[in-house]
Image (spheres, rainbow, N blue to C red):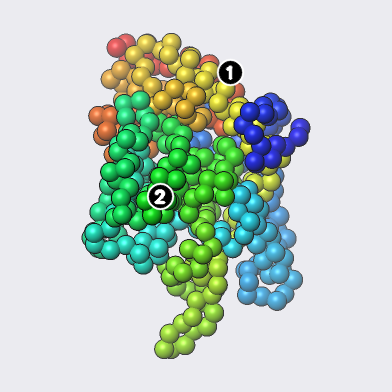
């Protein structure tokens, strides 16, 4: 199967995925839960891992386990080479020509806290504004609220319409000379909405604001190119894109990262230390204090290899077709209401409410049938308040999910209706 380039025209249809062959690469998909085959539909929370990623982790620990950057012995040099090669792979994967623009973090939440505490603390003052949206994950709200409480800048929110799309008419009012940063999600982890990143970024730049993109739900599922998007910062997590937990990244334009102060102090982020002070190291290491997540970074590099072999355009197309089918089938469930826009405006996830049945009860019944979904507010409580609901159930798909699994989900939801007889 040929691999489409990341700049391929969206009008050229990518080759279809061989989903059965892909499923064979994921050992956990052979599991049975409560005596039934596992149907894993919680990919927006975390993805499963292919054998190649698991093997990369094992090889590191069995053959190359050593600290990086600090040793001249063979194991340390091999570990350092693999660790930095993974950084280069990730940079290329998102369209950056400079590996030093990738700052390793534990996850996207840490990346956003790094951005707030380094760039935000250095650049935001009372009277300034940070613009967010109502559909943001808590990780793109709380770090700014913490900093605002200390520094006194304003936080404003672009509203969400009833159909799950952003109300763009408010942009001219909110993007004025006071707004220093527009930080928003590429794709909502609740509504599935894919936001018009290029349009929003152009509006922000015209107003003199920088742009940070929360791409946790986008980088694993579609081609993402930071150069083409023309954004300034981007955060994402490894564990949602077939990689291990404990690794994520902040990407930023090199000229912006160069002038940002270090956030955490410790080993490896310094050039020299004296009792009277210190000089930080250069990019990217000035932001990477202490022993890093070496194995996890190497594992993420293996995940990028797998995704590129499969083809991101092909993955995106398969998910678009699967979510269209899922929404059509879910419409047959009595009392079920889908949150968010039509299938052609969303990625591969769907959140819903089902009558007055609590989402946790729905998830519990489905779990007994071997089906894993997510229930709750999905770390987006303000968005649920916007829709006046306490929680929702969410099914989220990835490259290894099938129409047959959608059918099993719908069949199980019909059973939920029967059980609760509303």
In which quadrant is the N terminus drawn? top right
Placement of 171 over or under 278, stated as above or below: above
Residue ID for mark 1:
404
The one of 173 and 160 positioned closer to us in this rendering: 173
Q: Position of residue 310 (x, y in %)?
A: 69, 36
Asked where in the image residue 17 lies, by quadrant, the reply is top right
For residue 343, which numbered disc appears in the image?
Answer: none
Toward the front, the furthest residue is 206
For residue 206, which numbered disc appears in the image?
Answer: 2
Placement of 347 over or under 218, stated as above or below: above
Residue at image point 44% right, 45% down: 202
In the structure shown, which secondary structural element does the residue marked by tag 2 occupy?
A: helix
Q: Position of residue 292 (x, y in %)?
A: 55, 64
For residue 270, say whether it is visible: yes
**Side of 187 relative to 122 (left or right):** right
**Side of 201 relative to 358 (left or right):** right
Of the residues under marks 2 and 1, which one precedes in the sequence?
2
Placement of 27 over or under 245, stated as above or below: above
Asked where in the image residue 143 lies, by quadrant, the reply is bottom left
**Side of 62 relative to 404 (left or right):** right
- Callout 2 environment at 10 Å: few (<14), some (14 to 19), or many (20+)? few
Residue at image point 42% right, 51% down: 205
Q: CA distance from mark 2 to mark 1?
A: 47 Å
């Amino acid at each position: 199967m040929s691999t489409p380039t990341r700049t391929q025209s969206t009008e050229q249809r990518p080759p279809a995925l061989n989903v059965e062959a892909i499923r064979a690469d994921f050992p956990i998909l052979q599991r049975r839960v409560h005596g039934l085959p596992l149907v894993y539909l919680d990919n927006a929370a975390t993805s499963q891992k292919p054998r190649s990623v698991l093997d990369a982790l094992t090889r590191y620990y069995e053959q190359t386990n050593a600290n990086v950057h600090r040793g001249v012995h063979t194991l340390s040099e091999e570990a350092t080479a693999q660790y930095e090669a993974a950084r280069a792979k990730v940079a290329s994967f998102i369209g950056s020509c400079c590996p030093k623009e990738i700052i390793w973090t534990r996850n996207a939440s840490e990346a956003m806290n790094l951005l707030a505490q380094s760039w935000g603390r250095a650049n935001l003052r009372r009277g300034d504004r940070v613009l967010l949206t109502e559909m943001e994950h808590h990780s793109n709200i709380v770090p700014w609220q913490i900093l605002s409480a200390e520094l006194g800048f304003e936080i404003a929110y672009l509203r969400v319409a009833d159909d799950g799309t952003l109300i763009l008419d408010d942009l001219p009012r909110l993007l004025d000379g006071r707004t220093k940063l527009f930080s928003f999600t590429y794709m909502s982890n609740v509504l599935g909405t894919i936001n018009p990143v290029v349009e929003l970024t152009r509006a922000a730049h015209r107003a003199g604001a920088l742009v940070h993109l929360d791409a946790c739900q986008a980088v694993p599922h579609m081609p993402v190119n930071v150069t083409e998007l023309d954004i300034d910062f981007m955060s994402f997590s490894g564990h949602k894109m077939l990689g291990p937990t404990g690794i994520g990244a902040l990407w930023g334009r090199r000229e912006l990262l160069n002038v940002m102060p270090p956030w955490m102090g410790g080993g490896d982020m310094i050039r020299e230390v004296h009792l009277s002070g210190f000089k930080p190291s250069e990019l990217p290491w000035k932001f990477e204090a202490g022993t890093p997540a070496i194995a996890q970074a190497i594992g993420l590099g293996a995940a990028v290899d797998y995704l590129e072999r499969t083809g991101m355009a092909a993955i995106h197309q398969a998910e678009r077709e699967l979510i269209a089918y899922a929404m059509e089938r879910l419409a047959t469930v009595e009392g079920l209401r889908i949150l968010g826009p039509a299938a052609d405006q969303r990625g591969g996830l769907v959140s819903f409410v089902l009558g007055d049945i609590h989402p946790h009860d729905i998830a519990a019944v489905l779990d007994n049938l071997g089906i894993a979904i997510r229930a709750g507010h999905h770390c987006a409580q303000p968005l649920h308040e916007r829709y006046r609901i306490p929680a929702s159930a969410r099914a989220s798909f990835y490259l290894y999910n099938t129409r047959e699994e959608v059918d099993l989900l719908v069949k199980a939801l019909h059973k939920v209706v029967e059980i609760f007889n509303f």
